[in-house]
């Protein structure tokens, strides 16, 4: 299976997360990749990432978000972690996504949606500095919530 390098840019934190992922499906505007959580256990309160968990990651070159479907080592769905981002840059060897510090977690049954890092996003001052990006981020968050509640892709794999 083809492998790509995924780069998750976090400019506000001056940090980039880089890892390898297996390509499941890729076009010029969409990529679905599979990656394993190879870091230590992290309990976020609403979901726990365990070493060996599997992430099915959806990246879009024409949408302002990505969606990570989280599964345990046994395949049990844990939920979806959604990042509001600039549209991804999808290339033959790599995928690059710039995080805008606004997230959404959707529970496995899609009955609980939790907006995350709203204060961090607002503190960036995009409403004044870059109102177009600010508006696009909020539209993306609302679209994610609508898709999740309706059980539309990528929230339809249970």
Image: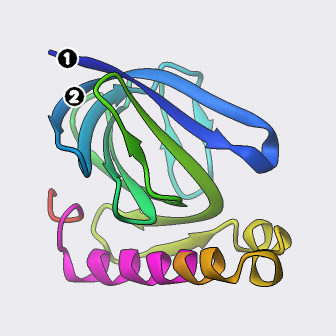
The percent position of residue 9, horizontal first and vertical second, equals 62, 40
What span is colored magenta in the figure?
A: 137-154
Could you tell me which residue is drawn at 78 percent across and 66 percent down?
A: 120
Disc 1 designates what residue? 2
Which of the pair 118/140 is nearer the observer? 140
| 100 relative position to 129: left or right | left
**Which mark identifies residue 158?**
none
Q: Residue at x 43, y 49 (%)?
A: 88
Of the residues under marks 1 and 2, which one precedes in the sequence?
A: 1
Pinpoint residue 148: horizontal percent, then vertical percent.
Answer: 30, 74
Q: Out of 31 and 157, give the one closest to the viewer.
A: 31
- Residue 140 inside the magenta-drawn segment: yes
- Residue at the spot x=27%, y=77% of the render? 147
Rounded to the nearest angstrom, the CA distance separating label 1 from label 2 is: 6 Å
Label 2 SS: strand
Picture quadrant of residue 91: top left
User: Against 21, is 150 above or below?
Assistant: below
- Residue 128 vs residue 75, the one in the foreground: 128
Color scheme of the displayed model: rainbow
Q: Which residue is mark 2?
A: 23
Name the spot of residue 50 as percent of width and height, x first: 48, 30
Secondary structure of the magenta portion, mostly?
helix
């Amino acid at each position: 299976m083809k492998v790509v390098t995924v780069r998750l840019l976090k400019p506000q934190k001056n940090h980039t997360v880089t890892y390898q992922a297996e390509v499941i499906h890729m076009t010029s505007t969409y990529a679905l990749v599979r990656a394993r959580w190879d870091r230590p256990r992290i309990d976020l309160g609403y979901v726990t990432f365990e070493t060996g968990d599997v992430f099915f990651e959806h990246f879009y070159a024409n949408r302002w978000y990505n969606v990570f479907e989280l599964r345990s080592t046994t395949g049990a769905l844990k939920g979806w972690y959604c990042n509001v981002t600039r549209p991804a840059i999808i290339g033959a060897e790599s995928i690059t996504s710039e995080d805008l510090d606004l997230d959404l977690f959707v529970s496995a049954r899609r009955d609980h949606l939790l907006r995350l890092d709203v204060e961090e996003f607002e503190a960036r001052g995009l409403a004044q500095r870059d109102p177009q990006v600010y508006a696009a981020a909020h539209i993306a968050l609302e679209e994610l919530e609508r898709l999740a509640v309706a059980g539309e892709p990528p929230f339809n794999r249970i």
